[in-house]
């Protein structure tokens, strides 16, 4: 069998070389034009992605401080040993990041999908207006949105606490609900801010819902299927690629969560380390302490963790993501 396989592979290679040599002048000319057209992307990928990644991998093996770049020294795997085995703050920051992801990711996916269902309902009037209103917050810069919510959720004057106080809850004042000062409430607070800007995910889900053939619903209705049965057996399987897309983007984005905690608390981790996300710790080491070699190591660890989560997610997709071209 090995001899037959080798002969087959050899014949295939010969046919490929023969076909390549038999290309006419027009085909060769078009091939050159193809390389010319994709050359801007290739140059950009090489200069702005591949080279910086190679440089950061090299920096991770250096004792490299931005304040004295000329004194960089090669230390091998010391930065990696420090990050993986000797720096407890790395693991604490991962615990904070993953705990927040466990809360934020399912809620964000569920809220985006739920609002998309609402906006896709045949009984909803003024759909265009509501779609605009739901999407509008996503175009507000994250920094501005974070500063707005720092006042909306203010324990002394925020209108959220004042509304809660109308129901007899002591929510206003020193003893009130302190959204940004209570370490147990911080993940909920940031999740609330994130959900406010979930309009882009809503539109993506809405596009997926509108692509579901109406004939499937009509057939299910004839068979007597109720709303939940149609949802579970038709809607969710048909939009599962869209859910999968939002899941991957949300997961990678949460592993890089940085802007909101940085705007509110800088790199202090207030309160009680509850906002010491991994990207906050990376920023502190790389730019605040100017430890660029160690910062490059932390960046590569983030890359490998995100890659691992993405690979696992893609590996499980075959069990729950349905594509219309798949065989039953």
Image: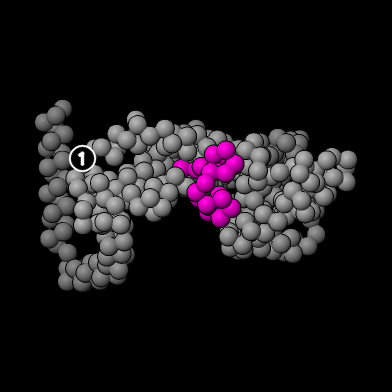
Indicate whether 78 appears above or below 127: above
Q: Quadrant of the N terminus?
A: top left
Q: Nearer the viewer, residue 142 or 238?
A: 142
Which residue occupies the foreground of this view, 64 or 61?
A: 64
- Magenta portion: prevailing SS class: loop
Say how the picture is coloured: one colour
Q: Which residues make up the magenta segment?
A: 258-278
Image quarter for residue 188?
A: top right
Which element is circle 1 on?
A: loop
Q: Which residue is mark 1?
A: 76
Pick out the residue farthest to the top.
1
Residue at image location 50% in from the left, 34% down from the top? 95
Report the front residue among 84 and 207: 84
Residue found 42% across the figure and 42% down from its top: 306
Q: Residues within 10 Å of mark 1 (few under 14, many from 20)?
A: some
Does the magenta segment cover residue 266? Answer: yes
What is the quadrant of residue 52 in the picture? bottom left
Residue 196 is at least partly visible in this image: yes
Tell me the residue at 17%/64% (across/down). 23
Q: x and y percent of residue 298 in the render?
A: 36, 43
Q: Position of residue 64 (x, y in %)?
A: 26, 50
Q: Any magenta on residue 88?
A: no
Task: Give x and y (percent) for residue 151.
Answer: 70, 56
Which residue is found at the position 31% from the left and 64% from the top?
44
């Amino acid at each position: 069998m090995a001899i037959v396989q080798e002969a087959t592979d050899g014949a295939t290679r010969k046919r490929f070389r023969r076909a390549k040599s038999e290309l006419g002048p027009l085909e060769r000319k078009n091939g050159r034009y193809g390389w010319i057209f994709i050359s801007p992307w290739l140059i950009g990928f090489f200069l702005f992605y591949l080279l910086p990644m190679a440089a950061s991998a090299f920096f991770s093996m250096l004792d490299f401080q931005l304040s004295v770049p000329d004194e960089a020294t090669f230390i091998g795997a010391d930065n990696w040993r420090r990050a993986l085995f000797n720096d407890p703050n790395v693991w604490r920051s991962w615990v904070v990041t993953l705990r927040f992801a466990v809360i934020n990711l399912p809620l964000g996916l569920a809220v985006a999908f739920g609002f998309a269902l609402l906006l896709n309902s045949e009984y909803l009037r003024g759909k265009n207006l509501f779609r605009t209103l739901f999407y509008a917050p996503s175009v507000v810069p994250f920094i501005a949105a974070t500063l707005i919510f720092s006042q909306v959720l203010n324990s002394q004057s925020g209108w959220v606490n004042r509304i809660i106080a109308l129901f007899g809850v002591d929510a206003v004042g020193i003893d009130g609900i302190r959204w940004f000062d209570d370490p147990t409430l911080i993940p909920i607070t940031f999740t609330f801010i994130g959900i406010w800007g979930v309009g882009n995910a809503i539109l993506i889900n809405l596009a997926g819902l509108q692509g579901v053939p109406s004939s499937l619903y009509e057939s299910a209705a004839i068979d007597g299927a109720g709303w939940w049965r149609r949802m579970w057996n038709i809607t969710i399987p048909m939009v599962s690629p869209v859910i999968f897309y939002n899941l991957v983007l949300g997961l990678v984005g949460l592993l890089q969560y940085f802007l909101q905690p940085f705007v509110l608390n800088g790199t202090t981790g207030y309160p009680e380390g509850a906002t010491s996300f991994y990207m906050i710790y990376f920023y502190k080491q790389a730019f605040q302490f100017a430890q660029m070699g160690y910062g490059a190591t932390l960046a590569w660890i983030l890359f490998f963790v995100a890659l691992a989560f993405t690979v696992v997610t893609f590996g499980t997709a075959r069990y729950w993501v349905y594509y219309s071209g798949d065989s039953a």
